[in-house]
Amino acid sequence: MPIIASTMSPTAQILFNENIFFMDKERAIHQDIRPIKVAIVNLMPNKINTETQLLRLLGNTPLQVDVDLIQTISHTSKNTAHAHLASFYKSYDDVRNTFYDAMIITGAPVETIPFEEVDYWKELCKIMEWSNTHSFSTMYICWGALAGLYYHYGINKKLHDEKLSGVFPHRKLSPQHVLMRGFDDIFYVPHSRYAYVSADDIMAVTELYLSATSNEAGVHIVTDETNQKIFIMGHHEYDRMTLAEEYARDRQKGIHTPVPVGYFPNDDAKQPPITNWKSHANLLFSNWLNLVVYQNTPFNPPI
């Protein structure tokens, strides 16, 4: 089913070419279907890439998805054109009275900075607090997950000695959890981060459940009791070349970054990478939107 969003955006053109259907709002209202209303709080520098990755997953479900893109106004993006943000993004003030079925808060490349020193931290805290009452289920991704666990539960991040980068095997700890439905015993997920949270800190909070983990990458999926808050360490949404591009960018900047583990054949960065995580990425988002959100929200939600 289609993504309901502007068909004029660069993201729409990319996904049109992949046969992922976009529909404008005028056409959507003539269909007798209640769409799932989703907000994406996009904190990543290259917002168009992140939009494309997430909308690709959201658009690969049998549900109609109505998307609002949200930016923080306390931070000036240096990697996305102002015209794009002005045309396709909203602010917290624009949507503060809107109720969403689902929300995504993305990662951001600020893991080594204390939370309170991130320039948009106060604004993000306001958004995370607002999500408690205006989003049925919120998915926090990578740094977004670190920020959410810190804000909601006081769990602070820890720093790796060097960047964790690669595609790592994971195992499910709660096979019956709704997000894990249909997952294989072992599945793969890309990671690219300097920080993490410990399993012991998660398990010390009675409201939190650890549903998936990795021997190499650590904590992966954490949820609260009702799945209103879902914290994902790692990047199911990454494209085939995302880790390669990040690795090349770090090297160009003179940043010592190890070759992403389990990504290039024989760990040879001159070889094209192999994708082995996309089927489970699609399954995760499908389980979330269908089993967590759609099956549990009213046909006539608050406006």
Image (cartoon, rainbow, N blue to C red):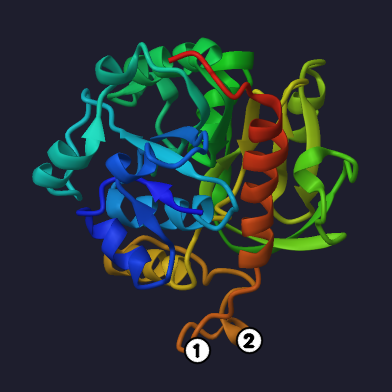
Contact between labelled residues 1 and 2, with CB atoms less than 8 Å apart: yes
Secondary structure of the residue carrying tag 1 is loop
Q: Image point 13% across, 37% down: which residue?
A: 86
Q: Is residue 298 left or right of residue 24?
A: right
Q: Image point 35% across, 34% down: which residue?
A: 68
- Can you say whether 68 is above or below 55 in the image? above
Label 2 neighbour load within 10 Å: few <14, some 14-19, many 20+: few
Q: Image point 72% across, 46% down: which residue?
A: 218
Q: Quadrant of residue 297?
A: top right
Secondary structure of the residue carrying tag 2 is helix
Residue 206 seen in the current view: yes
Q: Which of the two discs, 2 and 1, labels the residue nearer the N terminus?
A: 2
Q: Is residue 121 left or right of residue 232?
A: left
Q: Which residue in the structure is indicated by mark 2?
A: 266
Residue at the far left: name it.
83
Q: Nearer the viewer, residue 154 or 227?
A: 227
Say what amino acid the circle numbered 2 marks. Answer: Asn
Q: Quadrant of residue 87?
A: top left
Q: Which residue in the structure is indicated by mark 1?
A: 271
Q: Nearer the viewer, residue 194 or 9?
A: 9
- Can you say whether 222 is above or below 239 in the image? above
Residue 46 seen in the current view: no
Say what amino acid the circle numbered 1 marks. Answer: Gln
Quarter of the figure with the C terminus: top left
Q: Image point 52% across, 33% down: which residue?
A: 34
